[in-house]
Amino acid sequence: MRLFAAVIPPESVAHQLGAAVAPLHTLPGADRLRWTEPAGWHFTIAFYGEVAEEKLPELSVRLERAAKRHHPFEVCFSGGGRFGDRALWIGVAGAEAREAMARLAATAQAAGRRAGVTHEDPHAYTAHLTIARSRERGRPRAPGGRVALLPYTEALADFASVTWEVGELVLLHSRPPVSGVPGERPRYERVAGWPLGG
């Protein structure tokens, strides 16, 4: 199973984000991006990759312990960001909220290591919710290369959602597209969830 730990925004906040993202679909090059589905919006906290089913009970125990070590905390979506021209994302406002997300990520990653599930990411954790990705993988092959994402981040510069509480750590199963239909997206299925603070 391809698993990862995540934080999922409330439906009302996802709806507010959806209203901010909708106008981006009219920008030049938007049809050359792979847009994520609101139903699958999440913050990846720790990615574990392929996990053998027999390791799931231990991982679940470790993630429950990890969740207990953190109190619920408030976050607010704020502005847009990008990883080069590869991915477009929504960020989190305030150093305190970003630090709380990073601490939760570090604990969930440690839980994976202790359960014998490792997928080390060499990059520092950045709290972000991906809303679009380039259809070009690796070296761009399409005429004109990748879509320039700077105009998209500029369009999102003033966006701020209502404040909401992160109160749960969730384990999700990512099911990759199987139909072969262009544009099909992965499906995310909830495996388990644990309240922060126990």
Image (cartoon, rainbow, N blue to C red):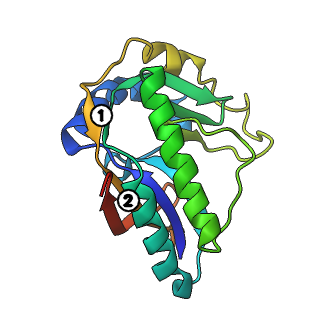
Q: Residue at x 42, y 52 (%)?
A: 69
- The picture places residue 68, in percent across and down from the top left corner, at 37, 56
The residue singled out by tag 2 in the image is 170
Residue lying at the far left in this picture: please name it.
Answer: 12
> Is 102 on the left or on the right of 20, as rendered?
right
- Say if 100 sits above or below 193 in the image: above
Q: Nearer the viewer, residue 164 or 157?
A: 164
**C-beta proximity under 8 Å, tags 2 and 1:** no
Judged from the image, the secondary structure of the residue bearing numbered disc 2 is strand
Q: Nearer the viewer, mark 2 or mark 1?
A: 2
> Is 163 on the left or on the right of 93, as rendered?
left
- The picture places residue 190, in percent across and down from the top left corner, at 35, 67
Judged from the image, the secondary structure of the residue bearing numbered disc 1 is helix
The residue singled out by tag 1 in the image is 18
Q: Residues within 10 Å of mark 2 (few under 14, many from 20)?
A: many
Q: Residue at x 45, y 13 (%)?
A: 157
